[in-house]
Amino acid sequence: MSDTWTVNYLLDDGGRLTGKIEVKSDEVRFDAMYDSSNAEIVKGILGAAGSFAASGGHVAYVRDTGTEFSVVLPQADIASAEQVKKGLMKRAVITMKDGSEFTFDYGMLSPKKLVAAIND
């Protein structure tokens, strides 16, 4: 059983990738559909250097085939997930056991169900 949401993955460098996040029993997987950064609308998300930057430097959790970009977070490596509000924007922040964080913006909608699914 899995649940899927359309969210924005917020990059450490200020960029944003729009895609689908799926919560499964063994992993949380984000598959980018396109780069929706205001400053980088035309920029692609391909290439090893681009994938390292796009992942926020968390190369262990990034899969880049050259045509597809994914962030795969094994459930066994996830320490916690929590809701964070910044202004009107609501986010789900996943913290890994190594201390790295992955932030997914859900706009003005509540990420309560997404966070609950990750923490189950």
Image (spheres, helix red, strand yellow):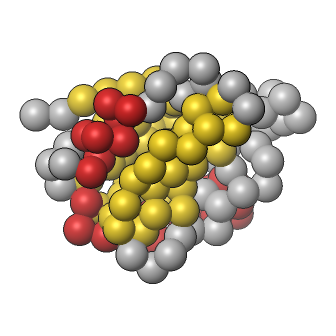
Outermost bottom residue: 98
Q: In this view, does 61 lie to the left or right of 66?
A: left
Q: Is residue 108 visible?
A: yes
Q: Position of residue 51 (x, y in %)?
A: 62, 56
Q: Where is residue 55 in the image (x, y as percent from the top left)?
A: 60, 57
Outermost right residue: 39
Q: Relative to residue 81, is residue 107 depicted above or below?
A: above
Q: Relative to residue 85, is residue 12 depicted above or below?
A: below
Q: How many labels does the image show?
A: 0
Q: Is residue 70 visible?
A: no
Residue at the spot x=48%, y=43% of the render?
Answer: 83
- Most foreground residue, 89 or 68: 89
Image quadrant occupied by the N terminus: top left
Q: Position of residue 77 (x, y in %)?
A: 31, 70
Residue at the spot x=42%, y=68% of the render?
Answer: 96
Outermost top residue: 109
- Most foreground residue, 105 or 84: 84
Outermost left residue: 1
Residue at the spot x=64%, y=68% of the render?
Answer: 57
Location of residue 43 by image quarter: top right
Q: Is residue 13 left or right of residue 20?
A: right
Residue at the spot x=23%, y=68% of the render?
Answer: 76
Q: In this view, does 54 lie to the left or right of 103?
A: right
Location of residue 3 by image quarter: top left
Q: Position of residue 15 (x, y in %)?
A: 76, 43
Q: Relative to residue 88, is residue 99 depicted above or below?
A: below
